[in-house]
Amino acid sequence: MDPFSQMTDWKKNMDQFFGEQFWDQFEGILKPTIPQINLYQTDHELLCIVNVPGLTDLNKIDIYADYASLELRGVIDISHQGGTVVKEEILQGVFERTVHLPFPVRPDKIQATYRNGLVYIQLHRLISDNSRKSRVQLELIEEE
């Protein structure tokens, strides 16, 4: 007998008791957030490195900078055909993630590049308070 066969019924009962939004509080615990990021800060710059394996079309990821946040939207799709999955640790699927930045950034001075499965986003500190949300262009860096 599969120990998880009744999990759907259990979740439905929990949803009825606590409400459907109950599980949203546990999303980061039950399912890790994708894509994974590293954020590095200097006095006037930020470097955000985003793990997006298998990206073949740069238009399939959207990056928006909005004052002191960075929005990432796209799909991680390994798209391997054939065989039965024995172990699957690389998280994939549609993602939408907002990264809160430690300081406001300049929308006119952002560079985003993609290399070896990683998106590198360079951001610069905003000195003025006048800012608008802007889409960031992503460039492909060919392997050497």
Image: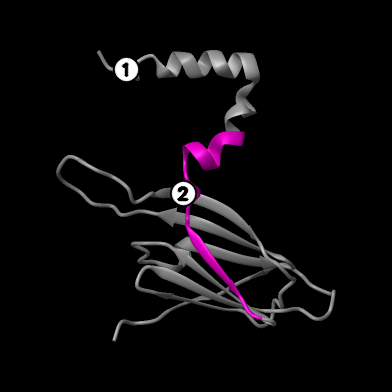
Residue 35: x and y in percent read 47, 56
Label annotation for residue 3: 1
Q: Dot 2 surroundings within 10 Å: few (below 14), some, or many (20 or more)?
A: few
Q: Position of residue 57 (x, y in %)?
A: 39, 66
Q: Residue 143: x, y in percent?
A: 30, 82
Q: Amino acid at mark 2?
A: Val
Vertical relation: 44 (above or below) 32: below
Q: Tell me the mark number nearer the camera, choosing from 2 and 1.
A: 1
Is 7 drawn above or below residue 27 in the view shown?
above
The residue most toward the right is: 129
Image point 64% across, 21% down: which residue? 19
- Magenta-drawn segment: 25-42
Going by the image, does 129 lie left or right of 26?
A: right
Q: Which residue is mark 2?
A: 94
Neighbourhood count class around disc 1 (C-alpha, 10 Å): few under 14, some 14–19, many 20 upward:
few
Numbered circle sitting on residue 127: none
Whether residue 101 appears in magenta in the rendering, the answer is: no
C-alpha gap between disc 2 and disc 1: 28 Å
Please tell me whether mark 1 sits on a helix, a strand or a loop. Answer: loop
Kind of residue sitting beneath label 1? Pro
